[in-house]
């Protein structure tokens, strides 16, 4: 995917956006809550044997006759976790959703790598342990099909997700699987420095139109149902989708996370220019 034309073009135009005040300090530019050697002063405290004498504040000693050291905020290398849904529902829409999802995951990994991090793309599928795609192996994503039956909620219940403390966490999925938004967001946001949920949908999933009588197949379970896709049916679907998106957005806000809705059909470039840049996940490079 590193050599994919859409990914290459986007990589020249964008950089990874970072929250102004995530839970554990700025990640990536990145200042944490501990002490370290950055240039941003945090506070004074009394000198203790073993402290670095280069941080002694001689002016404070002159004023108070007490040895004080200057503490600086800790510099942290960015830890970026990208989680890509590779379940069967991501393959709908003539593969547009899957293609944009793979390209977006590769792009975010490349942008995180530029910041000095070691990003990993965790494939949310059926393999155990879940495979992780590193920067040097992004080509694995090329032509990969989404065929898994596992869901994000199931993987969380099985404790399969390698969630690291204080990481920037990005989840790419359609989120069209049974779940409780409050519980899902709470688990994903736990101990994260920042969290983005990117919901990728096809244009038809985002705005369906009447089709008349159809036999619908559930790509996850293989079950089938005969259904008339008319205005009434579409209104029911839209209400349920809106409820889901509203709950995901509300719970993300509660957790100081960000929920992004994006339509895959226009391609990676359009998604970056509109939804992702508006939400701050990427910004002009």
Image (cartoon, rainbow, N blue to C red):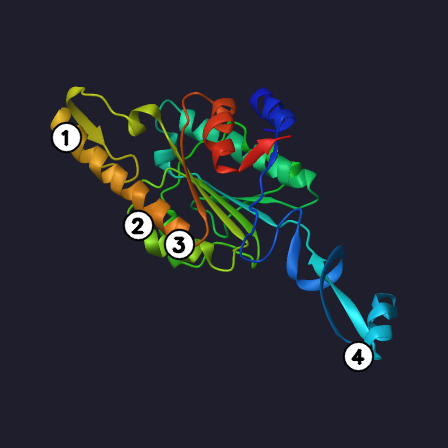
Q: Is residue 173 above or below residue 1?
A: below
Who comes first in sequence, dot 2 or dot 4?
4
Q: Which quarter shows the N terminus?
A: top right
**Label 3: element kind:** helix
**Label 1: element kind:** helix
Circles 2 and 1, Cβ within 8 Å, touching? The answer is no
- The numbered mark at residue 251 is none
> Label 2, label 1: how many angstroms apart (C-alpha)?
22 Å
Who comes first in sequence, dot 3 or dot 1?
1
Instruction: Report x, y in % for residue 107.
Output: 58, 32
155 relative to 25 in the view: left or right: left
> Label 3, label 1: how many angstroms apart (C-alpha)?
32 Å
Instruction: Report x, y in % for residue 142.
Output: 54, 28
Q: Residue at x 66, y 50 (%)?
A: 30
Q: Could you tell me if residue 228 is visible in this image?
A: no
Who comes first in sequence, dot 1 or dot 4?
4
176 relative to 267 in the view: left or right: left
Residue occupied by mark 3: 254
Q: Residue at x 81, y 77 (%)?
A: 64
> Label 2, label 4: how many angstroms apart (C-alpha)?
52 Å
Badge 2: residue crowd in 10 Å (few <14, some 14–19, many ≥20):
some
> Front-most of 231 and 40?
40
Residue occupied by mark 2: 179
- The numbered mark at residue 48 is 4
Who comes first in sequence, dot 3 or dot 4?
4
- The numbered mark at residue 233 is 1
Who comes first in sequence, dot 3 or dot 2?
2
Who comes first in sequence, dot 2 or dot 1?
2
Q: Could you tell me if residue 91 is visible in this image?
A: yes
> Front-most of 219 and 74?
74
The image quarter containing residue 232 is top left
């Amino acid at each position: 995917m590193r050599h994919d034309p859409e990914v290459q073009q986007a990589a020249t135009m964008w950089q990874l956006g970072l929250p102004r005040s995530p839970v554990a300090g700025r990640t990536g530019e990145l200042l944490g809550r501990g002490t370290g050697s950055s240039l941003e002063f945090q506070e004074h405290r009394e000198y203790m044997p073993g402290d670095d004498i280069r941080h002694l504040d001689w002016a404070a000693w002159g004023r108070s006759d007490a040895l004080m050291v200057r503490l600086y905020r800790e510099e942290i290398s960015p830890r970026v976790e990208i989680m890509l849904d590779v379940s069967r529902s991501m393959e709908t829409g003539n593969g547009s959703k899957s293609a944009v999802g793979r390209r977006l995951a590769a792009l975010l990994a490349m942008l995180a790598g530029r910041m000095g991090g070691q990003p990993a793309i965790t494939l949310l599928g059926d393999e155990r342990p879940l495979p992780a795609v590193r920067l040097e192996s992004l080509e694995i994503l090329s032509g990969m099909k989404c065929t898994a039956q596992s869901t994000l909620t199931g993987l969380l219940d099985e404790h399969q997700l390698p969630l690291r403390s204080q990481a920037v966490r990005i989840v790419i999925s359609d989120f069209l699987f049974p779940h409780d938004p409050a519980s899902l967001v709470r688990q994903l946001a736990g101990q994260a420095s920042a969290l983005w949920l990117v919901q990728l949908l096809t244009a038809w999933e985002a705005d369906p139109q009447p089709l008349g009588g159809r036999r619908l197949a559930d790509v996850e379970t293989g079950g089938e149902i005969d259904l008339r896709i008319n205005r009434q049916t579409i209104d029911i679907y839209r209400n349920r989708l809106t409820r889901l998106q509203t709950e995901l957005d509300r719970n993300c806000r509660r957790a100081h996370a960000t929920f992004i809705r994006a339509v895959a059909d226009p391609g990676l470039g359009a998604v970056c220019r509109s939804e992702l840049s508006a939400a701050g996940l990427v910004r002009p490079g």
